Structure formats: C-alpha cells, structure tokens
Amino acid sequence: MSDAPVAVITGAAGGIGLALTRHLQRQGYRIVLVDLDQAALERAAKEGSLDPARILLISADVSCEDDVKRYVAAALERFGRIDAFANNAGIEGAPALIEAQSVEMLDRVYMVNVRGVFLGLKHVLQVMRRQGSGAIVNLSSLAGIMGAPTHGAYVMSKHAVIGLTRTAAAEAADVGVRVNAVLPGAINTEMMRRIERDSGNATATAAANRAATPLGRYAEPEEIAAVIAFLLSPEASYVTGSLYTADGGMSTF
Ligand SMILES: NC(=O)c1ccc[n+]([C@@H]2O[C@H](COP(=O)([O-])OP(=O)(O)OC[C@H]3O[C@@H](n4cnc5c(N)ncnc54)[C@H](O)[C@@H]3O)[C@@H](O)[C@H]2O)c1
C-alpha cells in the first residue's frame, strides 16, 4: 500500500469531489480530502464508505494561503508525495445581472474559484516539480467558455481557470507534470440544486437545462469523476493544457 498513488481533492465533501474520491479509492489511491469543515468531511467519509486507513481529512479554506500550505504539508507528512491533484472546490455565488451584482459577491466568487485554484497550483506544483511527476485537473465549467446570464462572477472565474490551466501546463511540462481542465455542463449536485432554487423557478430551470443538453439529462457526478480520473491517470500521458468538456453536448449548438 505504501507505493499506492496519492491524490489530493479539494471540495471533497461536495458532489463531484466525493464521487471522485470514491472513484480513485476503487483504483487504489490514498486520498487527502480537503473541504471547509470537518463535520462535512466526516459525513462524506461515512457516506462514501471510505477506508479510514487510506484517507486524511483536512478542513481548510482554499482561498487562504496558510490553509493551502497546511493541506499540502499534511498530505506530505501522512503519505510522502502527491501524484494527483483535483483543484475542485468552487462556489457559484448569488445570481444577478452584472449591473446589479455586488462587489462583495464578485470578490467571494473570485476568492474561492480563482485565488483558491491559483494557490492550489502554486503549492502543489512546488511538490510535483521536486518529484518530477504529477497530474493536476482544475475544475472549470462550460461557463469557462460561454456566457451565462446572471452568473457573470462565476463565468469570469471559470474563464480565469482556463487561463491558469494553460499557463501551468506550459510551465510544468518540462518536469513531466500535466495540468488539464474539465468543463462540466449541468451536473446533479447540491450546487445545481442551489442554482435551480435561486433562479426562482427550479422546475422551469431544470427543464431548460435538460432541453439545452443534447443527451437530454443532467450528468451524475460519477460521470464527471470518471473524466477527471482519466486525466489524472497515466492513461492520459500525452494530454496537457487541454480543456475537456463533459456536458452532454450542451456546448455543441
Ligand atoms: N454541479 C455542476 O453543474 C457544475 C458544473 C460545472 C462546473 N462545476 C464545478 O465543479 C466543482 C465542484 O462542484 P459541485 O457541483 O461538486 O459543487 P458542490 O457545491 O456539491 O461541492 C463544492 C464543495 O466545495 C466546498 N468549498 C466551497 N468553498 C470552499 C473553500 N473556500 N475551501 C474549501 N472547500 C470549499 C464546499 O464546501 C463543497 O463541499 C466546482 O468547482 C464547480 O464550479 C459544477
């Protein structure tokens, strides 16, 4: 077990994060789960039937550099290396037209989705550069390549994740570290439930999302986890700086 690969997943107590944790555990990874609070992590570990001997739960705010240093240090102390990093924690923010959006909400979304992703890259890349190996997936969104009315702050943040992904991929390629982005469409998680609720008409919003998706349904988080896991694996050895849409065809028309 001591030579089993090690993954760090932020936002691990959420929909996609927990599905990815379960997927990687089935593949034999030892996993560091990072999320805002310990109780949510413990609930997730129970719900996901995770093996306590092969996981480490760290409560941390990805937008705080000291917390990021702490989760990276804890991963190294417990497992000695980081082979795979899913930079996944994100928030959607409250919906509003740009002219009505508060600067406070803009800053909140930016802090988690951009600063948090940047800090994760900064500190995990230091480790992977020393190792001379590793793979990273940043969670962008279809909102990273398209507009989304009333979600300007989120759209801005997910476009930024793509720029960071491409830059990190170019900077880390010489030491054999790969960095890619996954762009989900509409996924069946709490985030989507909040987006539906905040729209004022959850049923109509869900129906509109399905109608805009050629496959005609939301993805289950496991379907996104499988794409992330592929990009983190040696199977994707020639893939870096890429944008992987996993959107049921939503971006095709
Ligand atoms: N659900 C979708 O339809 C969808 C679509 C496109 C992209 N995404 C992206 O996928 C990622 C995961 O989303 P999800 O649907 O699983 O959402 P989710 O709300 O189910 O989970 C997100 C997790 O991130 C954690 N988190 C939030 N802020 C944090 C912080 N500052 N520090 C540490 N953890 C924090 C939350 O506690 C939560 O457990 C996000 O980056 C999201 O933007 C989701």
Image (spheres, helix red, strand yellow):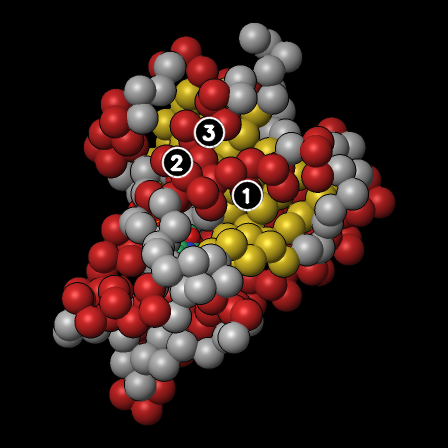
Quarter assignment of residue 159:
bottom right
Alpha carbon distance from label 3 to label 1 = 11 Å
Q: In the image, is the residue at mark 1 within 8 Å of ligand 1 by its beta carbon? A: no
Q: Is residue 204 visible?
A: yes
Query: What element does badge 3 sit on?
Result: helix
Query: What element does badge 1 sit on?
Result: helix
Answer whether labels 1 and 2 touch (C-beta < 8 Å). Answer: no
Answer whether labels 2 and 3 touch (C-beta < 8 Å). Answer: yes
Report the side of 163 relative to 246 (left or right): right
Please, what is the three-letter code of the amino acid marked with disc 2?
Ala
Q: Is residue 111 visible?
A: no
Q: In the image, is the residue at mark 3 within 8 Å of ligand 1 by its beta carbon? A: no
Identify the residue position indicated by label 1 in the image. Answer: 227
In the rendered image of this protein, does residue 182 appear above or below residue 221? below
Alpha carbon distance from label 1 to label 2 = 11 Å
Please, what is the three-letter code of the amino acid marked with disc 3?
His
Rendered location of residue 109, percent (x, y): 38, 66
Q: Which mark is residue 19?
A: 2
For image coordinates 31% across by 50% down, the residue present is 188
For image coordinates 78% across by 43% down, the residue present is 238
Disc nearer the start of the sequence (3/1): 3
* Viewer-side residue, 63 vs 141: 141
Alpha carbon distance from label 2 to label 3 = 6 Å
Identify the residue position indicated by label 3 in the image. Answer: 23
